[in-house]
Image (spheres, helix red, strand yellow):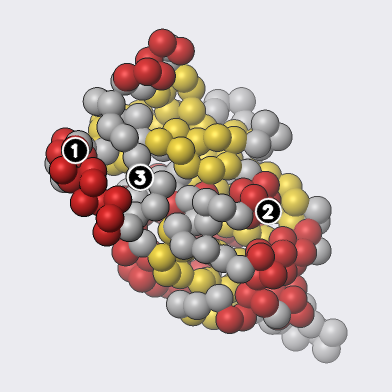
Amino acid sequence: VTGKDGKTMKKKAFIFYGGWEGHEPELESARFKRWLEEDGYEVDRVDCFDKTFDLDYMKSMDLIVPCWTQGDIPDPAAFTISEAVEAGTGLAGCHGGMCDSFRWNVEWQFMTGSQWVSHPGDQLLHHISYLTEENLAYVAKNYPRNNDPDAFQRDQKIEFVRNSSSPITEGLEDFMVHTEQYYLHLDPCVNVLATTAVDSQGAHRANGVVNMPVIYTKLWGKGRIFYSSLGHKDYILEIPQVETFMRRGFRWASR
């Protein structure tokens, strides 16, 4: 980026992290900060919503990276981020850190393009809407299979869309991964870059195999949005293909 004085300026990225600790938001957001700094960004990383209320500050960013699972974002903060992206700031993230962030905020879901609703898994398991102590105790008592450490994990193949011209996935080879498989409710306008086959168990099985998007992009005004459903734990981001498309996705989404 070149400033008015002709000098080269670093791009600016804003990362906010928090929420459910099971997704390792501190570790993942630190990794994202390191990647972005290696790619020449100036990064502001915080563990609160305070700066998200400042429209001028959000608009001054080239990229916003949310890393916050569940919780509740105040509507004014969501509106500010939405307006900043509409004006040209990029938005990019992964897994529950972006598209299972604020389940009751419809503006957030509309902007980001999807919402997690289930881990199909290899057996039918119920899913808690709010991870409260009361709800967790109820599930532990009545659905003990949910407490299996590997309950929501499964082997799955990630397949890149072959006719895509996107630089985000160019040259990448399909790969296998053992992790959570996301079933998403999606905006039909997203541009899908990779998928995984979901053969749900239980009641949904009657619908057959579903080709579920894993990576996609979307436009929001002048802003660009990138999302990957992979990233349940920090180590998933170490997979070469995942690191490659995440770093490319950050750069693609940036102003």
**Distance (Cα) linking label 2 and label 3:** 22 Å
Q: Earlier in the sequence, mark 2 or mark 3?
A: 2
What residue occupies the far right of the structure in this picture?
A: 4
**Distance (Cα) linking label 1 and label 3:** 13 Å
Label disc, if present, on residue 142 of the rendered structure: 1
Left or right: residue 203 versus residue 73 is left
Residue drawn at point x = 47 percent, y = 42 percent = 116
Left or right: residue 189 versus residue 46 is right
Around disc 2, counting alpha carbons within 10 Å, would you say few (fewer than 14), some (14 to 19), or many (20 or more)? some
Please identify, in this view, whether the residue under mark 1 or under mark 3 is nearer the observer. Answer: 1
Residue 242 visible in the snapshot: no
Q: Quadrant of the C terminus?
A: bottom right
Around disc 1, counting alpha carbons within 10 Å, would you say few (fewer than 14), some (14 to 19), or many (20 or more)? few
Observer-nearest of 131 and 6? 131
- Image-quadrant location for residue 155: top left
The three-letter amino acid code for the residue at tag 2 is Glu
Label disc, if present, on residue 128 of the rendered structure: 3
Residue drawn at point x = 27 percent, y = 59 percent = 133
Is residue 44 positioned above or below 228 on the image?
Answer: below
Label disc, if present, on residue 107 of the rendered structure: 2
Q: Position of residue 248 (x, y in %)?
A: 54, 53
Q: Position of residue 223 (x, y in %)?
A: 74, 57
Q: Position of residue 108 (x, y in %)?
A: 63, 54
The three-letter amino acid code for the residue at tag 3 is Ile
Q: Quick check: marks 1 and 2 in contact, CB under 8 Å?
A: no
Element class at badge 1: helix
